Amino acid sequence: MKKSKNFIKIFKNNLFHFVFLLSAFAVLIVSTMAILNMTDTVVNMNSAKETLNSAEEFVINNYKYRLHSSASAAQHLLKASDLETLRIRPGSPDSQESWFKDSGFLALRELLIRFADENGLEYVYYYFRIDNFVQPLIDNDPDVLEAYTPSSQLFAIDDESRSAWNNKQVTVVDDGTIIDLDGLLTAYAPIFNDDGEVFAIVGVDIRDEQINPLREQIGFLSERIESLSSRITTLMVAMILALLFLAAGGVVTFFNHRKISKILRDALMQAEHASRAKSDFLANMSHEMRTPMNAIIGMTAIGKNSDDLERKEYCLTKIEEASIHLLGVINDVLDYSKIEAGKFELSNVEFGFEKMLKRVCDVVAFKAAEKKQVFNVKIDENIPRALIGDEQHIAQVITNLLSNAIKFTPENGSITITARLEGEKDGHHLVKIEVSDTGIGISDDQKAHIFRSFEQADNSITKRFGGTGLGLAISKKIIESMGGAITFKSELGKGTTFSVAAPFLPVSEQTEEPSARQSDDCLAESYDFSGRYVLIADDVEINREIVIAMLEPTNIAIDCAENGAIAVRMFSENPNRYDAILMDVQMPEMDGYQASQTIRAMDMQKAKKIPIIAMTANVFKEDVQRSFSAGMNGHIGKPIDFNEMLKLLNEYLR
């Protein structure tokens, strides 16, 4: 009886631990059963995936066999003498009727149409090579209005057709690119003349109806396998934790070692810290993106339903502010992604340091004025007027520090930015920039992780002031990439001072400052492009409408093309009509890069000189460089900066 009472007493005193042990044991059992079930499912899915992979390989090999056979047959369908009559030379008739009559074009096309139908081909076509371009000769398109004539344009030769020409053998595209964007599979074969030399190239296309569905199924299975594997990993972690909890609970229950429980809890907290920080970041990002989106959608609805012009103007102003804020959030995430991926690059150019600093201060000054803050700017006269460095990114860092100072400083506080020359080191001018405020300050506990990604000094900061928690992390990476350093000192409740020390190269001869930028508040009415024509190439209708509306006050005449191929055709038909081309990059049928290269390759003086300006959401440095490499003269990022577009047009049209 006494032992029974003691047991009951022990049970009552350790009731929580017994419940804890039973719960951990239940988690262990359930996790084990789930893992076994999921593992079996993953094995079956892997087996199905292997079967689909084999099926895909079989289908690809079958397609390659058909392509090779069809291309070989097409080699002997038309002779070199037949194709010789279709070659375009000086003096060839340019009208379709004369072309058809003199070249025997229609009879040969009927032969190609029958050949394509008998062999299950989508297209069969013949090219003649001219250096790095091909001249279309004939194809099986039944629409005679699309016939190749002397007015047809040259196309850049691709790798497979070049291989077929140079190696004098049938060439099928490789597995990686066997299906193009239109779902076609292609093979090329050379056509030989009587001397055994390659005279032309024949291409055959088969439309895929099997590979893409198989790849979609394989992709679906891969996603499911990855998802289940992730769940299995999670459950295994849960099993391990359950085992740890069982061991710890037993020790605590029977030996009263509470320190072990504390160690386990601390270890678990540390293991979850990074995941929790990223989860908090995603929650903050969702809030930061949804808040301006809510304002944009809400103000759009209010503006549409209001007949009051002042009310509509107010809504448009709020929509603009919310859009700028949303773009800033997106840019922060993109900058951080580039830094993490190791793609962050500096761009050193000559710039006016004082003008850059004043421009940044002008941008943020209105925020300080709204909070009735005193905003002081002090610039050392010893700083050279012109320096060489990354103007854009140093301006980004200063803007971030000033924005934080204004955000975390209450009304009637003060913000001071000071820039001074610290001296020279290793041939560089060392400039120190300090941003001081009388704001809320940073506690000692918060200072340790102020520069960490996804975090702010305190979670309550996000709730009170907003923000992604990336600004300072990005700023630190930028300054360190420049070879500088960023530090701070702060006292809770009294304010903070951030110091940036950045090196800049001197300008060899400083005769005058870099030219000042045109004011960003310039209006379209100040530009008059009357009598000028511009061609806009963009596949998205609303983008075309926005540009047309933006340029309407300038009196410029505008034509539109829905893709690069149409833009090339419109320009080639009337090149003297256009004074500039605004070219989107990602378009169907022919993208902006191909269209620009095709225009530049035309044998006319206007094609070499007409300004082509990229107008695209591809805004990374490599994207800008690719635009220039394709023959474009300028680059405008989306969302479109209207003033930047006006300046570029004015530069080329004045």
Image (tube, rainbow, N blue to C red):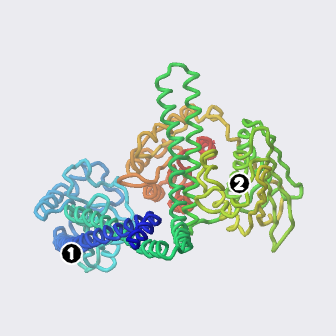
Q: In the picture, residue 166 is in which quadrant?
A: bottom left
Q: Residues within 10 Å of mark 1 (few under 14, many from 20)?
A: few
- Relative placement, left or right, of 611 versus 169 is right
Residue for point 78% across, 51% down:
495
Q: Is residue 71 visible?
A: no
- The residue positioned farthest toward the right in the image shown: 382
- Relative placement, left or right, of 46 versus 497 is left
Q: In the picture, residue 212 is in which quadrant?
A: bottom left
**Earlier along the polypeptide chain: callout 2 or callout 1?**
1
Q: Is residue 79 visible?
A: yes
Q: Using the image, tell me which numbered label, if any, was put on residue 200.
A: none
Q: Residues within 10 Å of mark 2 (few under 14, many from 20)?
A: some
Q: Amino acid at mark 1?
A: Ser
Residue 557 image position (x, y, % from top left): 51, 35
Residue 476 image position (x, y, % from top left): 68, 63
The residues tagged by marks 2 and 1 sit, at their Cα atoms, a distance apart of 55 Å
Is 186 rendered above or below residue 109?
below
Please, what secondary structure does the residue beneath circle 2 have?
A: helix
Read off the residue under disc 2: 395
Q: In the picture, residue 211 is in which quadrant?
A: bottom left
Is 11 rendered above or below residue 304?
below
Tell me the quadrant of the picture where the C terminus can be found. Answer: top right
Residue 52 image position (x, y, % from top left): 21, 70
Tell me the quadrant of the picture where the N terminus can be found. Answer: bottom left
- The residue positioned farthest toward the top in the image shown: 307
Read off the residue under disc 1: 54
Q: Amino acid at mark 2?
A: Ala
Residue for point 48% across, 35% down:
297
